[in-house]
Amino acid sequence: MWTAEKEARSGFRRFVAGGLSILIIALVPGCRRGEKRAAEKEALEGDVSITAAFAIYPLILKLADEFQKIHPGLRFDISAGGAAKSVSDTLNGLADLGGISREAHPQEKGRGLWSAPVARDAVLAVVSEDNPYLNELLRVGAGKDVLARLWIDGNIRTWGDLTGDASASRPVHAYIRADPCGAGEIWAQFLGGQQEDLKGTGVHGDSWMAGAVKKDPLGIGYANLNFAYDARTLAPAQGIHILPIDINDNGRIDPEEDFYSTRTRLLEAIASRSYPSPPARDLYLISRGIPQRKPIRQFVIWVLTQGQAHVFETGYIPLPDPMLKDALRDLTDR
């Protein structure tokens, strides 16, 4: 990893660590004394089942692993699926907790779904590294209106329509998520529509989306941040490139819009709000009602406090202190 990148990542971690130390000091006194003792001293045992949306799945794996080191008597059963499956499993009692990559819908809250924000990430447009127009795409990017014309209006047919270069006459192959998911919902929201408005060839899940784009030089899709980047190298995943968003819509990617070379740079752009929201979004833990069973309740408390120390290293953005305080207060005051 090049030196400037190491310094950026180190500085961001110091910032996060400093903020978290203050956050934990502020939050823990707000917990009931019995809950604090249970979370910090009492050994917890039993099974905890979680159905997580693809976007939050890597984070939940990490958090569960770290919590299990503190409480080795706990056993976590974690599966991945779309946001709709996570909500369904949670409300129907098939999972103790869920993880979703969007806000809970009013009708879901009406059925008793409780949620707490735990981190932040983003959805990104991705293209194949073998795209014949890649250099031009990276130079000009694509504005929100252009992307809406591609995925919602359906009137962008060629790569020339997308880049403005009439000589780029080969067709665009747009891909969409066929399963109800937070990524599709947030991407459609960014473009001014709903997930069912998106047009393209449907694929299931982030891995399949990334695979389809890798294999298709004329393909374009959207993927959650941690499927668009390699967790080891922090560079874009092998075989794909991130299509930069022309945020100011001036027909080119300016230096202040060019933050996609590594996952760390993009995380910093999300944290500073340089990358737009949506498609940046908050991620949530959910349960059927306020969590009451001790292992589940203490796990959520830990995620909102000490567990935040593991958010950035897993490729996500820690949330602002007030959001975490509000979530913890909602949990511990009832």
Image (spheres, grey):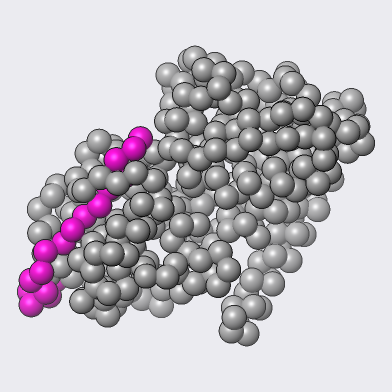
Q: Is the magenta stretch mostly helix, strand or loop?
A: loop
Q: Quadrant of residue 18?
A: bottom right
The answer to whether any part of residue 290 appears in the image is yes
Q: Which of 221 and 256 is in front in this view?
A: 221
**Quadrant holding the N terminus:** bottom right
Residue 105, percent from left and from top: 43, 26
**Quadrant holding the C terminus:** top right
61 in relation to 245, above or below: above
Residue 141, percent from left and from top: 28, 69
Q: Quadrant of residue 132?
A: bottom left
Viewed as shown, does residue 121 lie left or right of 70?
Answer: left
Viewed as shown, does residue 190 lie left or right of 296?
Answer: left
Residue at the outermost top position: 111
Residue 27, percent from left and from top: 79, 39
> Number of callouts in the render?
0
The answer to whether any part of residue 29 appears in the image is no
Residue 93, percent from left and from top: 57, 18
Rendered residue at 54%/45% (across/down): 56
217 in relation to 209, above or below: below
Viewed as shown, does residue 70 lie left or right of 261?
Answer: right
Rendered residue at 22%/39% (across/down): 197
Q: Give the range drawn in magenta.
A: 164-180
Say if the magenta span includes residue 147. Answer: no
Q: Quadrant of residue 99?
A: top right
Rendered residue at 16%/61% (across/down): 172
Rendered residue at 28%/37% (across/down): 194
Residue at the outermost bottom position: 3
Say if the magenta span includes residue 165. Answer: yes
